Image (spheres, rainbow, N blue to C red):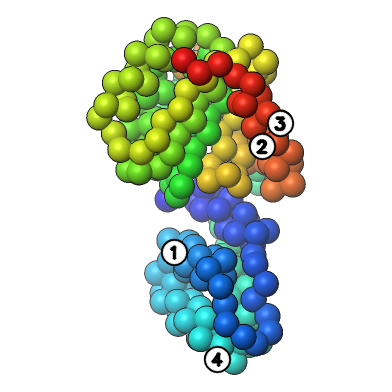
């Protein structure tokens, strides 16, 4: 997993942590969160992941919960700080003119890291979205695509894609689009400086995550546009 993608997943994990303190049995919310946390820490560092897994099991088993809660959050903060120190100071990735393949690779890595759902908003989306990016999506994930132009092109590609790949695909068209955005797992929001089909070909562009509170606002806006959009 690309460090920037992993970093953003860890930030979202931290921002969405359920109550872990106190005694008593955990519910599915806590178990699911600890499972995601263990997987992400292992992706960051395998040795840390082994220790984290032991800590998470003790925490779930109500063993020395105060100490283990502290250990869990300390490790997550350590992972975030380590990744931040290793990455450039910019919030996302910038791509100069001609760096189309670097952009292609970065966006494919983001799509490949999807756990449950992908929602792509791009007014000028065309069939390249299927050919170049959705092929890296893990099997069984749900996908929504929202665009303005090239309806026939996207309709044909969507039909072919659905016939071959497992998972749920929905495609809609709206004239109320301005941003180019990729929503991952309903919690992450990545903004693109140009449409996917033209990114970094002749002009510079970027791929950057938004803060969780900003991402939530963007998600609310585009969920409203999605509901009003026309299915193709």
**Residue occupied by mark 2:** 219
Q: CA distance from mark 1 to mark 3?
A: 31 Å
Q: Is residue 199 visible?
A: no
**Residue occupied by mark 1:** 39
Task: Farthest residue to the bottom: give it.
Answer: 64
Q: Is residue 15 left or right of residue 159?
A: right
Place of residue 117 in the rendered image (x, y in percent of width and height, measured from the top left): 48, 42
**Residue occupied by mark 4:** 63
Q: CA distance from mark 4 to mark 1?
A: 21 Å
Q: Mark 1 touching mark 3, by CB under 8 A? A: no
Mark 4: few, some, or many residues within 10 Å (few <14, many ≥20)?
A: some
Q: Residue at x 51, y 86 (%)?
A: 61
- In the structure shown, which secondary structural element does the residue marked by tag 2 occupy? helix
Who comes first in sequence, dot 4 or dot 1? 1
- In the structure shown, which secondary structural element does the residue marked by tag 4 occupy? loop
Place of residue 161 in the rendered image (x, y in percent of width and height, measured from the top left): 31, 25
Mark 1: few, some, or many residues within 10 Å (few <14, many ≥20)?
A: some
């Amino acid at each position: 997993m690309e460090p920037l993608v992993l970093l953003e997943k860890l930030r979202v994990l931290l921002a969405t942590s359920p109550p872990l303190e106190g005694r008593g049995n955990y519910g599915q919310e806590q178990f699911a969160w600890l499972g995601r946390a263990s997987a992400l820490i292992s992706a960051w560092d395998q040795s840390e992941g082994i220790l984290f897994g032991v800590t998470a099991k003790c925490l779930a088993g109500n063993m020395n919960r105060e100490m283990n809660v502290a250990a869990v959050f300390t490790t997550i903060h350590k992972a975030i700080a380590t990744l931040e120190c290793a990455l450039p100071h910019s919030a996302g990735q910038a791509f100069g003119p001609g760096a189309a393949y670097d952009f292609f690779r970065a966006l494919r890595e983001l799509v490949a890291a999807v756990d449950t759902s992908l929602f792509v908003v791009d007014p000028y989306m065309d069939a390249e979205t299927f050919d170049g990016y959705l092929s890296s999506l893990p099997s069984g994930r749900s996908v929504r695509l929202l665009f303005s132009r090239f309806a026939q092109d996207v309709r044909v590609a969507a039909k072919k894609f659905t016939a071959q790949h497992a998972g749920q695909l929905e495609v809609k068209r709206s004239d109320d689009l301005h941003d180019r955005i990729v929503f991952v797992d309903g919690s992450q929001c990545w903004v693109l400086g140009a449409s996917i089909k033209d990114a970094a070909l002749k002009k510079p562009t970027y791929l950057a995550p938004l803060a969780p509170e900003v991402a939530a606002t963007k998600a609310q806006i585009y969920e409203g546009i999605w509901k009003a959009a026309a299915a193709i």
